[in-house]
Amino acid sequence: MPSQQGTPVKSVVVPFEPDTPPSSLGHLGHEVPERWHTVDRSAHAPHIVAVPGDDGADWVAAALVTARPHTAYLKIVDAVGDVPATVEAVIAHARDRGLVQVKWEGWTASPEAAAAAGFAPLCPPLSPVEDGAGPDAGYVRWLCDGPGTEPPYYGQTTHFTCGAVTALVAKAHGGTLPREALDREAELTLWRDATNFPACEPIGLGVAVRRAWPSSPVTVHLDTDQPVLLDHCTEKEQEWRALLQRTSRTEAGRIGVPVDPGRLSLAAIRSAVGRREHVLLLVSLAGMQGFDVPHWVLCHGAVPGAVVIEDPWAQAGAGDTWVDAHLLPVPDSSLDTMSTLSADRFRGAVAIGHPQQRDASSDEPPG
């Protein structure tokens, strides 16, 4: 990673309003990409980090920067003008805010320009990206020691298979599942075994993971003995879904999946990922995306002050792409809030340990 220059680049930070962009953008002599205006990025605090010229008035470079709320990174959507100068200004801006990471979408950034600025390429997603929903490439620069090995990124292909996807990504990251086996058939097969129709509740997901990979230790953490994720259902629907959840508890006991009734702490999550284990964590999307929907994410690493997750879903309509969702650092306090769900304020998680060596060869991918 290049060292910081002795004299930091002077910069200007202003909000970005697509209907009334700063007049200084027009003086750059570069066409501002149309994508800056075609989606509503307002939920992700869009702003411009610009570098003024020697006269202090006209800008010589500018970058459109966004980030999910309650996270510890910034994302460069595009940079125009003197690109190295504005990227350096964004990095300084992120440091000033105490953030741990800067990402750069690869709409116009070349691998050479990204590398020169100290960015590493992100592994491209294994699932297809719809036209306009995200760039083919992305780059990351950690402003601290990074979390270790990069997992593959796979975006869920339905609205309800997040639990299955996080489990599959965990097994691919751990080396148990070949990356080429992480596909839609595997996604839907594991979901079908885990679902409480259509969501995956913690015990059912833990049972399905253990059945799919018998040699992998699995522990479910759920600090309530009541059925969960049923608030939106009618009383009649709650009855039969609750029955399925009780059946999952019985099955967990039968196949040896412990259900820990204590609340899983952020310290315990950090400890698990520090041992290169994986934690599938149930969160609400209210903080990051603005709507209170339960959702599974994968905790796989930690950096100072933040846990690094994989989120299998991105909100393309808000300019949110796989670059945001991949290697996403979330401050401990934010993750603590996100993972306290519903009026009952429960926390659900599935911890997956290292496969037992003598049985590891028995693990087969679902399909």
Image (tube, rainbow, N blue to C red):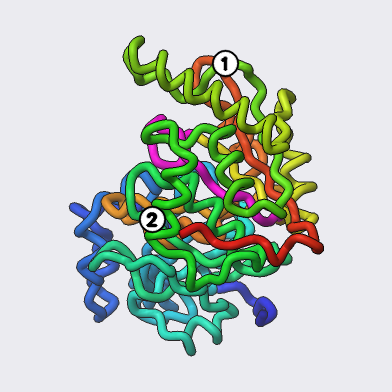
Task: Pinpoint residue 142: horizontal percent, then vertical percent.
Answer: 63, 67
Q: How far apart are marks 2 and 1 (CA)?
A: 44 Å
Q: Mark 1 points at which residue?
A: 226
Total marks shown come to: 2
Residue lying at 47% horizontally and 36% vertically, measured from the top left: 200
**Left or right: 325 with respect to 364?**
left
Q: Callout 2: few (<14), some (14-19), or many (20+) C-alpha neighbours within 10 Å?
A: some
**Outermost top residue:** 235
* SS under mark 1: loop
The region drawn magenta spans: 284-302
Residue lying at 37% horizontally and 35% vertically, measured from the top left: 198
Task: Pinpoint residue 6: horizontal percent, then vertical percent.
Answer: 68, 78
Q: Residue 347 or 289: which is nearer the viewer?
A: 347
Q: Which mark is residue 21?
A: none
The amino acid beneath tag 2 is His
- The vertical placement of 178 against 209, above or below, is below
Nearer-N-terminus badge (2/1): 2
Does residue 296 belong to the magenta stretch? yes
Q: Quadrant of residue 224?
A: top right
Q: Mark 2 points at which residue?
A: 47
Dots 2 and 1: beta carbons under 8 Å?
no
The amino acid beneath tag 1 is Gln
* SS under mark 2: strand
Residue lying at 25% horizontally and 81% vertically, measured from the top left: 29
Residue 95 visible from this viewpoint: no
